[in-house]
Image: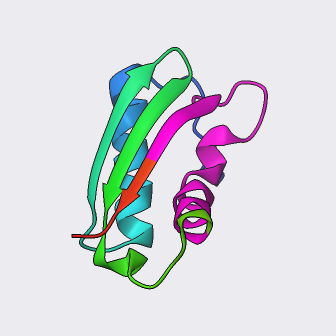
Amino acid sequence: MSHHATRLSVPQTLQAIRDRVEAALPGAQVRADGGGGHFVISVTSAGFEGLNTLARKRLVLRAIKDLMDGDDAPVHAVDRLDTLTP
């Protein structure tokens, strides 16, 4: 079964973003907002300790990769991605 998430509503997409990032970074605080394929994501995680900004962002984007794959993907762009440590 594919995890490709197509035709999700905005609330379902926001929840899917939160679920995937929390799975990749247990204990993370994840805020996601947006719609129309464009999203703003803020992640606060102790898992970012010692990582540079690029490594932090790659970690988050890898977690939501399936939501960004394909022409009908629910996430077309992450307009802003904040990666913070507690």
Q: Which residue is drawn at 45% across and 70% down?
A: 24
Q: Where is residue 17 in the image (x, y as percent from the top left)?
A: 43, 45
Quarter location, residue 29 = bottom left
Q: Which residue is drawn at 47% across and 45% down?
A: 81
Which contiguous range is marked in magenta?
A: 55-81
22 sits left or right of 36 in the view: left
Q: Position of residue 19 (x, y in %)?
A: 36, 54
Q: Where is residue 69 in the image (x, y as percent from the top left)?
A: 73, 41
Of 81 and 68, nearer the camera is: 81
Q: In which quarter of the image is the C terminus?
A: bottom left
Q: Above or below — where is 39 with respect to 28?
A: above
Q: Which residue is drawn at 77% across and 35% down?
A: 70
Q: Residue at x 57, y 38 (%)?
A: 5
Of 7 and 86, nearer the camera is: 86
Q: In the image as oriented, which residue stretches furthest toward the top? A: 36
Indicate whether residue 68 is drawn in magenta: yes
Indicate whether residue 74 is drawn in magenta: yes
Q: Where is residue 30 in the image (x, y as percent from the top left)?
A: 29, 52
